[in-house]
Image (cartoon, rainbow, N blue to C red):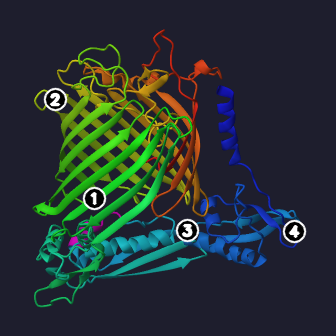
Amino acid sequence: MVRPAVLALALVLGAGGCLRPGRGTPEEPVVRDVLFRGVKAVDPGALLERLATQPTGAWAWSEVQRLDPDALAADRRRVEAFYRARGYYEARVESVDVLPPGGKLVDVVFHVSEGRPTRVTKLTVNGLEGAPEAQARVGKLPLRVGDVFTDQAYDATRAALASALTSTGWAKAQVEQRAAVDPDTATAEVTYDVTPGRRWKFGPVDAAVGGQLPRGKILDQVLAVITPGDWWDESKLAVAQARVFDLGAFGGVRIEQLAPDPVRGTIPLQVVIQRAPFRTVRVGPGVGLEAIRWDAHVLVGWQDRNFLGDLRRLDTELRLGYAWLPNPWRPTREGTVGLATIGFSQPGAFTRWVDASAQLALEKGVEQAYDFYSQRLRLALPLRIRSRWKLVPSYNLEVYQLSNFGAVVVPGTTSGGAIVENCKGSVCLLTYLEQNIGWDGRDDPLNTRRGLYVALALQESFHIASYGYRYLRFLPEARYFHPLGPSVVLALRARAGALIPISEIGPPPIVALFTAGGPLSMRGYYNRRLAPMELQGNLWVPVGGNGAADGTVELRFGVAGNLGAAVFLDAGTVSEASAVPTTWQQILDVNRVQYAAGFGLRYRTPFGPVRLDIAARLPDRWSTASDAFPAVPFTRRADGSLHREPIVAVHLSLGEAF
């Protein structure tokens, strides 16, 4: 079992290095590589991005790049301009070699003399003393004496001065910049001339809307950020626009400045709304393909973003289909599946800061361990605090009627199985309060390159009459993204969940427990397969545990056009299921953590990347023997032997793993 799995992974990883040399001629050679000699002060990768001459990609499907002498001549000037923008005015391209001469497959080599960097010897800001509030706000400037004189820092300093002025009342301030560069001494004297003008305040706010739109509600969101009579702060315009757009009913929102009122010293504002259709209908087929599940379905949805006026939102969706586990050819479980949801939301239901929403879902489903019918109700009060913050308190009621599972367990005992532990017969009920708190500092939620995201979900469950199971449940998560180059991003994620029973007998119901594994978790396992399991007939089905933790280190990089790739290392662990409050702490034992390494391809679409990942679990010692690969935690046969899952897992999904 081990050797084919390792071989499959090696073939996939090795495919990334298959260079297609192309077929060049001496007259039109193919560019194999572009090299730089003498480049030390700048990033060669960033320099290469600016050139027309590019190397042929290292992938079999990459476009063949042919040498263009005219583009090569222009690239010499591009290299020198790249250096000048970074303060190296003496930089020159001494020569460009095409090697081997007359070859069909060639390397292009730029020989660069960088010269001395030009440094700032004098920096003067004139006129800022006339705006003391802005002077106090500006802080440390991006460009300082002794720095290398770069275009980026030069322009950023002007922008920093302008921002300090326009955010402290000086709405019409002007900032002019000039620099005297002396090539002989490699020095620069930089001057910024500030003309503050008059200090202004926010004036009255109006909204240009039609009769169907609630003008008062739109203005209410603007006035949550902007108060007429306060000193002008241009940064608040974008925040106010975002609050109005987040009402969810408009194609676009813009807040425009009207003619200033010199008598009152104010600048009026007007909210301009770009209308979008209030009602939309969605109809279409769909398929879901996983290694452990196939399904086909038809979806019908209807949405009204101004239901009964006042921007109330009504969403309805019906999905009907059929599912096979693991596939249609060898199903161990199969059956009809369906999901009907209806959701209602009211922005600004309780003051401008608090919305209200309700959702009811009815579902018939097929899981690995059981079939079910469920009814789920959620009542929430989302808070509009800041654009990057999320705080959603809610009340949740969930009822599951389970069927087609293994032996029925008497609550309070551990004989037979764990599927309906602490359920009334085959009915499992959960009722709980939940608080979702998050801060999103990412530059783009779909194709993230930079930023930090942190979130915390808390649940407090309680009884209804004799139904339910009391527990505390928390799930913190952190994600970090950092660009390492124009098309390279380092992505990190870590999360850990814990369920703490409160004065209960027996493990929590299966519908409350944690599992791991799958395309959004530890990719060395298939969906939910990293979890304590129980044997039903000849099948192992995941039951879950009181705790689960997983994490990822992923390097994402572009390949060609919309195609990208990634290499990653995943880690994950779970605890067993128990009524003991401290059982979840088993996930803190680093010796129980399992690892998987893998490679993936991504194709960018407007809805997020289509993603194919192949991951192989790593052994816990230097061996290719099957018993070197960790077994499923807390899972043993009746004779005490361990259960192990396949070493290699393949995942196809939409959207990044995080």
- The structure residue drawn at horizontal position 57% and vertical position 54%, both measured from the top left corner, is 557
Separation (CA) of disc 1 from disc 3: 55 Å
- The structure residue drawn at horizontal position 12% and vertical position 74%, both measured from the top left corner, is 216
Residues under numbered marks 1 and 3 in contact, where contact means CB atoms less than 8 Å apart: no
Tell me the SS state at disc 1: strand
Circle 2 is placed at which residue position? 467
Residue 86's disc is 3
User: Which amino acid is tagged 1?
Assistant: Thr
Circle 4 is placed at which residue position? 25
Residues under numbered marks 4 and 3 in contact, where contact means CB atoms less than 8 Å apart: no
Task: Return the residue nearer the eye: 224 or 399.
Answer: 399
Residues under numbered marks 1 and 4 in contact, where contact means CB atoms less than 8 Å apart: no
Separation (CA) of disc 2 from disc 1: 30 Å
User: Which amino acid is tagged 4?
Assistant: Thr
Q: Is residue 626 visible?
A: yes
Circle 1 is placed at which residue position? 316
